[in-house]
Image (tube, grey):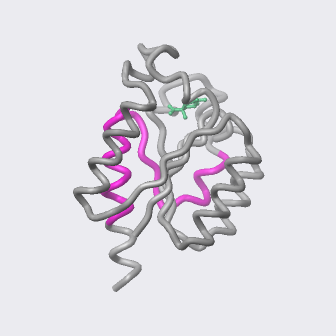
Amino acid sequence: TTIYVLNGPNLNLLGQREPEIYGSDTLADIEAACTTWARALGLSIEFRQSNSEGQLVDWIQEANSKGAGLIINPAAYTHTSIALLDALKAAQIPVIELHLSNIHAREAFRQHSVTAAAANGVIMGFGASGYRLAIEALKSLIESQAS
Ligand code: DQA
C-alpha cells in the first residue's frame, strides 16, 4: 500500500522557521525518517510539500484515485480552507490530519481546524515524531478497512 504524506505552506522552511515551535528537523529530515518508518511497516510513501492550496487539492484527488492512505499537515490552510475540507470529504480513503505543534495551546485563530472534520483522526503536539505516530495509525486504519 502507498501512503501520501502531504505538507502545506511554509513547511518547506522547517528547521529555520520558528524552531522553538516546530523543531530543528528540516522537511528533508522528516521525509527521510518517514521513508524508513513506512518501509518498516511495508508501506511505500509519496512525500510532498506545496505552498499552493490548489496543488494540495490536486494531490488529495490523486491519492484518492490511487486508493492510497493519506497523512496531511495542511499548515495554515487548516484554519481557512473549505477547498481542502471538500477534497478530503470527497476522498474515500483513510485520512490523518497532523500538526507538529499543539494548535489548541496556541493563538485563538489556530485553535479551530476547518479540515479536521474530514479526517479519521488528528495527531498534534509531538513534533516530527508525530509523523511516525501518524504512519502507525494509518497502517492500523488500512488494516481494519481490509478486514
Ligand atoms: C501547523 C500549525 C499551523 O497553525 C501553522 O499554520 C503551520 C504548522 C503545525 O504543524 O503545527 O504552518 O500545521
Identity of the residue furthest to the left in this view = 40
83 and 124: which is toward the camera = 83
For residue 141, above or below residue 114: below
Q: Is 20 on the left or on the right of 72, as rendered?
A: left
- Residue positioned 36% across, 41% down in the render: 130
- Residue positioned 39% across, 71% down in the render: 142
Count the labels in the image.
0
Counting from the top left corner in percent of width and height, residue 92 is at 59, 73
- Residue positioned 42% across, 55% down in the render: 45
Query: In which quadrant of the rendered view does residue 51 lie?
Result: top right
Quarter holding the N terminus is bottom left
For residue 64, above or below residue 33: below
Counting from the top left corner in percent of width and height, residue 114 is at 67, 47
Q: Is residue 38 magenta?
A: no
Counting from the top left corner in percent of width and height, residue 50 is at 64, 38
25 and 99: which is toward the camera = 25
Q: Quadrant of ligand 1?
A: top right
- Residue positioned 38% across, 51% down in the render: 134
For residue 23, above or below residue 56: above
Identity of the residue furthest to the bottom in this view = 147
Stretch in magenta = 114-139
For residue 8, above or below residue 120: above
Counting from the top left corner in percent of width and height, residue 132 is at 31, 46
Query: In which quadrant of the rendered view does residue 100 lie?
Result: top left
Quarter holding the C terminus is bottom left
Q: Is 100 on the left or on the right of 83, as rendered?
A: left
Q: Is 127 on the left or on the right of 8, as rendered?
A: left
